[in-house]
Image (cartoon, rainbow, N blue to C red):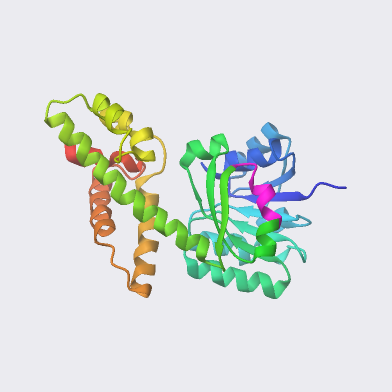
Amino acid sequence: MTEPTVAFIGLGVMGYPMAGHLATRGGRKVVVYNRTPEKAARFAAQFSAKTAPTPRLAAEGADFVFSCVGNDDDLRQVAIGADGAFHALKAGAVFVDHTTASAEVARELYSHAKQAGFGFIDAPISGGQSGAENGALTVMCGGDAEDFARIEPVVAAYARACRLMGPPGTGQLTKMVNQICIAGLVQGLAEALDFATRAGLDGAAVVDLIKNGAAQSWQMENRHKTMLAGEYDFGFAVEWMRKDLGICFAEARRNGASLPVAALVDQFYAEVEKMGGRRWDTSSLMARLRK
């Protein structure tokens, strides 16, 4: 039996290693498209893959097409734009979108896909750059159960957890919950570490003790050392977190949810941007407390 072919659109910080896992752990024949052709060529050389000059050509003949791009507009462009993948997807294929985008665009593209006879799963991810590189991402999916059942074993190449949350858009809604949680967690950790330092405590020793109790979190475990050292040149960028929070606020206006902590943290991130931290890691909330 011939192995299914896959296409991957968007070889950014997350997409590049994810596509790499499809080629290595997944043993798939991978065709890649990237807005910067040089990066696609580098990927092809590293993983013995093929490149395509447009999303449409990348998707030709593919059983599964994955995308991981910047925002709603980028997603529409690579999916239904003039050279979008949707124009070439065959009946029965599945398009899996890993972009953190709105639930609205997920439902829109799902409708386009179903009318054309193929599947669509919105599947935003969490775990950061290290999670992508280590193949240990959490994938939150929305769509039809039969499409999810087909893509789940393929996604397993780079995921430690993958779950169907409900109909189209619910993957994106789940990612919004994730980002709302992170905003408050990182701000709380920044305040706590700054407090510990000003109180004359050894911040690393404090964390080593309290991480065994109720205060423990992924952010504490993975970011406290670099926050104490003032190092923010890695991970998930502030400008992307603000983009994601903007999506959360738009959805909250629709569903009536109150997000006062997330709104306050977004203001703090705006201050970090003014400090030159657009591309700093989200843990750089610590920097504004030390300025």
- Image point (17%, 29%), residue name: 197
Q: Nearer the viewer, residue 190 or 20?
A: 190
Front in this rendered view, residue 94 or 32: 94
**Residue 115 sits in which quadrant?**
bottom right
**Residue 109, horizontal then vertical, whole percent:** 59, 69
In the rendered structure, does residue 155 fall within the stretch colored magenta? yes
Q: Is residue 110 left or right of residue 195?
A: right
Residue 161 versus residue 60 in the image, above or below:
above
- The part of the chain drawn in magenta is 150-158
**For the point 68% across and 57% down, which residue is it?**
149
Looking at the image, which residue is at 56% across and 72% down?
108
Q: Is residue 229 visible?
A: no
Q: Does the rendering let one see residue 184?
A: yes
Residue 172: percent from left, percent from top: 49, 61
The quarter of the picture where residue 214 lies is top left
Q: Work out which quarter of the rendered image holds the C terminus and state it.
A: top left
Give the left or right position of residue 41, taking residue 269 as reference.
right
Q: Residue at x 58, y 44 (%)?
A: 159
Q: Main secondary structure of the magenta part?
A: helix
